[in-house]
Image (cartoon, rainbow, N blue to C red):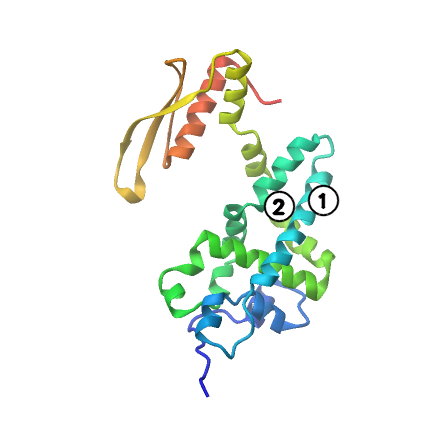
Amino acid sequence: MTQDFEPQDVESASDLCRRLNLPFSNLSILTRALTHRSFVNENPNSVQDNERLEFLGDAVLDFIVGAWAYKRFPEMPEGDLTKVRSVIVRNEQLANFARRISLGNALRLGRGEASSGGNDRDGLLGSAFEALIGALYLDSGLGAVEVFVDPMLNEAEAFILDEIHDPKSRLQEWAQAEKLGTPHYVTVSSAGPDHAKEFEIEVRIQGATYGRGHGPSKHIAARNAAQTALEALGITFK
């Protein structure tokens, strides 16, 4: 009989449960939530992978986040509430939540996935967080999910509001309203080693430079350029 491989230095489901004060009565479902398909492929005698729980957790998070946004921002219009939910449930943000609770330390991965840094990869972490939510919902109900997730949402509120009031979108709305066309973002320079680059980007409208921004990625530098342009134009978010 083939003996299942158990990875070393991986936090157990029971230890994770105690560390995060999770109210699981059935640790097997939590173990399943932490099990990636790469582990199951190498260990056919193990529990199922977490993909079905990921599917369920995605649906639960949609509801929980929607309810949180509705209560947290009572004056916010429906369109902005939709943006808030979209920002929170995208994989990148879910991966950030997973890192906040060090979920990667508890993931059961195959040897190859583990050796390639899978426990810190956005795609895998975001999916594992959804699976954890799905497992918590099945074991303890919607109220337990709210207790677990709401503090993370409250902490992320400032970032979320900044994301939905994206300066690039606001600048584009202004330029189109003024019939000036679409802003263009041009990389002026980049400096530094690959792991610590600094980009400088200009935002131009009809060939004229409206703002300039710096940042560790082109995305951030472009956002800063748009924000600089908005400030120069005297445009603020409502």
Which residue lies under the disc numbered 2? 153
Residue at x-position 33% and y-position 32%? 199
What percent of the width, then of the height, locates residue 111?
Answer: 39, 69
Residue depth check, mark 1 versus mark 2: number of the one nearer the observer = 1
Image coordinates for residue 206, horizontal then vertical, percent: 40, 13
Q: Secondary structure at mark 1?
A: helix
Q: Determine whether, in the image, residue 185 is placed left or right of residue 94.
A: left
Instruction: Indicate left or right for 141 with 84 as reference.
Output: right
Quadrant where the C terminus lies?
top right
Q: Residue at x 37, y 13 (%)?
A: 207
Q: Residue at x 50, y 58 (%)?
A: 102
Residue 145, position as x, y percentages in the image: 68, 56
Q: Residue flagged by tag 1: what amino acid is it?
A: Ala
Q: Is residue 145 visible?
A: yes
Task: Name the side, left or right, on which 108 lies relative to 161.
Answer: left
Q: Are marks 1 and 2 in contact (CB under 8 Å)?
A: no
What amino acid is labelled 2 in the image?
Leu
- How far, Cα to Cα, is label 1 from label 2? 11 Å
Circle 1 residues within 10 Å: few <14, some 14–19, many ≥20:
some
Mark 2 crowd level (few <14, some 14–19, many ≥20, 10 Å Cα): some
Residue 156: tell me if it is visible: no
Residue that carries the numbered disc 1 in the rendered image:
67
Q: How many marks?
A: 2
Picture layout, residue 162 above or below residue 31: above
